[in-house]
Image (cartoon, rainbow, N blue to C red):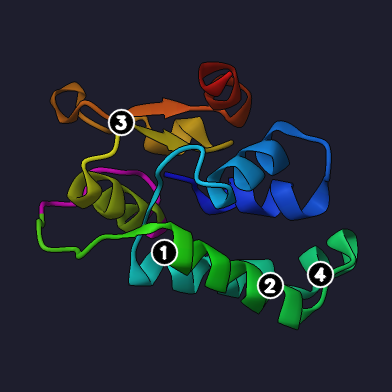
Amino acid sequence: MLDTSVLVAAIRSKTGASRILLDAALDSKFQFCISTPLILEYEAVLTRHGHLLASRISNADVVELVDLLCNKGIQVELTETWMPILRDPDDEMVLSTAINGRVDAIVTFNRADFAGIPEDLGIEVVSPGEALRRLL
């Protein structure tokens, strides 16, 4: 699954690993999970004024991107619950989506934020560059 930090990087740079991963996801080159809270976060963060200015896109462009992600992603219902384990409570819904979606990996720039994931969950935390190398 793609953490919000990856999408921010993808809209800000057309040539980085994050953009290549986003394009690959939208071209169905790999499966990714989404959830309602994750989609809401994507839209809220990507429409921040600073991100729109830096990426030179509009709110409408973000809405279109989020719609594409909704159409291509695997919708996950957040049914399994547990005690919070991450240092940033805002990342718990990312982890919840990953656990409920039974993903192999969370792709993020904020690897340290996910350091509390127990190994027995089988979820790796990888950078966009590492995820891209695995796809190629």
Check if residue 88 falls in the magenta segment.
Answer: yes
Note whether 69 is above or below 133 in the view shown: below
**Earlier along the polypeptide chain: callout 3 or callout 1?**
1
Indicate the amino acid at tag 1: Leu
Compute the Cα span from label 2 to label 4: 9 Å
Give me the residue at 40% from left, 47% from top: 32
Dot 4 amino acid type: Leu
Q: Which residue is mark 2?
A: 62
Residue 56, magenta (yes or no): no
For disc 4, the neighbor class at 10 Å (few under 14, some 14 to 19, many from 20) is: some
Residue where numbered disc 3 is placed: 104
Q: Secondary structure at mark 3?
A: loop
Tag 2–tag 3 contact (CB < 8 Å): no
Image quadrant assignment for residue 128: top right
Q: Where does the image place residue 108, in percent across and percent down from the top left?
A: 53, 38
Q: Amino acid at mark 2?
A: Val
Q: Position of residue 21 (x, y in %)?
A: 61, 38
For badge 3, the amino acid type reads Asp
Looking at the picture, tell me which residue is in the foreground, 37 or 83: 37
Secondary structure, mark 1, is: helix
In the image, residue 95 sits, relative to residue 112, either above or below, namely below
For disc 4, the marked residue is: 52
**Disc 4, SS:** helix
- Disc 2 is placed on an element classified as helix
Instruction: Name the residue located 83 percent from the left edge and 45 percent from the top edge.
Output: 14
Q: Position of residue 77 (x, y in %)?
A: 20, 65
The residue under label 1 is: 38
Stretch of the chain drawn in magenta: 82-90
Q: How many angstroms separate mark 3 from mark 1 (CA)? A: 17 Å
Q: Nearer the viewer, residue 75 or 37?
A: 75
